[in-house]
Each structure stands twice: as C-alpha cells, then as structure tokens.
Image (tube, helix red, strand yellow):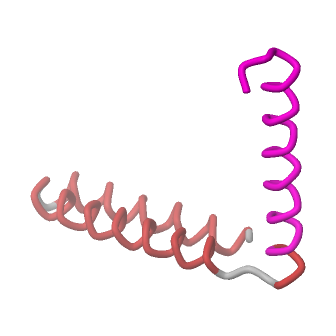
Amino acid sequence: MSGRIIAIVLALAVIFGLSVWVDNRIAAGAGALLLLAGLIYGYVQTKRTTPAEDARSERSAREVREEIVRAEEERGTR
C-alpha cells in the first residue's frame, strides 16, 4: 500500500515539474492520463473481491433491506 502512495506522489511531482519547466499543456495532458489511469485502477481494485467478501456484502445488503422494511412497517408507510 505504501508503495502505491509513493508512486502516486512521485507521478504528481513529475507532472508538477513538467508544468513548471516545459509547458502547462504537457502537464494537463499528463494529468488527464494520470487521472484516467487512477480511475481504471480504482475500478479494477473494486471489482477484485474474494468469495468471502462477496458473501459478507450480500449479507449486509440483505440486513439493510430488512431494516428498511421493518422501519416502514413501524411507521405504517408500507
């Protein structure tokens, strides 16, 4: 995890250095590519789960749905 943070900070430092040294258009393009890469990385990391995590999230979602139904029945809105 800390290696990822170091890589992100290093990439941001390089982009900042480019923007100061060369031209802001290069930095804007690199920043957009870095943002796109971050979005793709986050999407892939979110999709990669274990069966135990999937079961736990399904169980939690079911509990929340049951709580909502119970609260609606208590208020008489259902």
Q: Could you tell me residue 34's position as x and y percent?
A: 35, 67
Q: Is residue 42 left or right of residue 60?
A: left
Q: Residue at x 32, y 62 (%)?
A: 15
Comparing 43 with 15, the one in front is: 43
- Type of secondary structure dominating the magenta stretch: helix
The residue at the point 81 percent across, 83 percent down is 50
The correct choice, above or below, for 24 with respect to 37 in the image is above
Marks counted in the figure total 0
Q: Position of residue 35 (x, y in %)?
A: 36, 62
- Which corner quadrant of the image does residue 78 belong to? top right
In the depicted structure, whether residue 28 falls above or below residue 10 = above
Q: Residue at x 81, y 15 (%)?
A: 75
Q: Please tell me which residue is depicted at 84% across the width and 26% down the height of the picture.
A: 73
Answer whether residue 24 is magenta in the image: no
Residue 56 location in percent, x, y?
88, 67
Query: Which residue range is magenta in the image?
Result: 54-78
Q: Nearer the viewer, residue 37 or 54?
A: 54
Relative horizontal placement of residue 63, taking residue 32 as reference (left or right): right
